[in-house]
Amino acid sequence: MKKYCEECGKNVETKVIAKKEIYDVCGEPVEVDTQVVVCVDCGEEFYSEELDNATLVRAYNEYRRRHKLLLPEEIKEIREQYGLSQRSFAKLLGWGDRTICRYENGSIQDKAHNSLLLFLRKPGNMGRYLTENEVTLNERQKRKYNG
Ligand SMILES: [Zn+2]
């Protein structure tokens, strides 16, 4: 794919090269393997949203691995285990409306939230959590979480 290179001052051929980059994730440097589009003549890098997003996902996942944080898919699985929508799950836990939605879409969860989600992953713990935190449930919810 040809692109205009500012350095060369003309349209040039491009290629994709692999390199390592340091990304800042939650204030912490994370090294990731990344792919970048460069000018074949001078090596100038071009921004590619697609490649950049892919790298960011890898950086976030590396950060999660390091801190033993749940992956977005895992958070989704926990929620679905209780048959809850993103909004009702967040509400039940006393979190902001969009919190679960953001986590499932790739935002890094905070540590306390992660610990609670890990606890809730174990079947039966939802009932315990809700009782201990005196969350008022209706009869249908009681059957669902204590069952
Ligand atoms: Zn160039």
Image (cartoon, grey):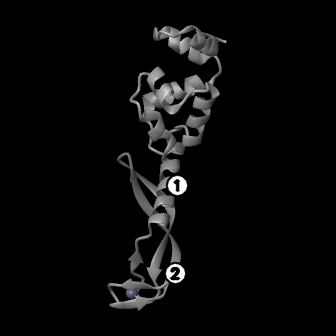
**117 or 79: nearer the eye?**
79
Report which quarter residue 97 is drawn in. top left
Residue that carries the numbered disc 2 in the rendered image: 15
* Residue 69 location (% of width, % of height): 52, 38
Residue that carries the numbered disc 1 in the rendered image: 58
103 w.r.t. 57: above or below: above
Q: Is residue 1 left or right of residue 81?
A: left
93 w.r.t. 59: above or below: above
Q: Amino acid at mark 2?
A: Lys
Look at the numbered disc 1 and give the secondary structure of its residue. helix
The residue drawn where x is 62% and y is 34% is 77
The residue drawn where x is 61% and y is 15% is 145
The residue drawn where x is 51% and y is 13% is 130
3 w.r.t. 79: above or below: below
| Quarter of the image with the C terminus in it | top right
Q: Amino acid at mark 1?
A: Arg
Q: Is residue 32 left or right of residue 140?
A: left
**143 or 43: nearer the eye?**
143
Looking at marks 2 and 1 on the same chain, the residue that comes earlier in the sequence is marked by: 2
* Residue 42 location (% of width, % of height): 40, 87
Queried on whether the Cβ of the residue with tag 1 lies below 8 angstroms from ligand 1, the answer reads no
Rendering quadrant holding ligand 1: bottom left
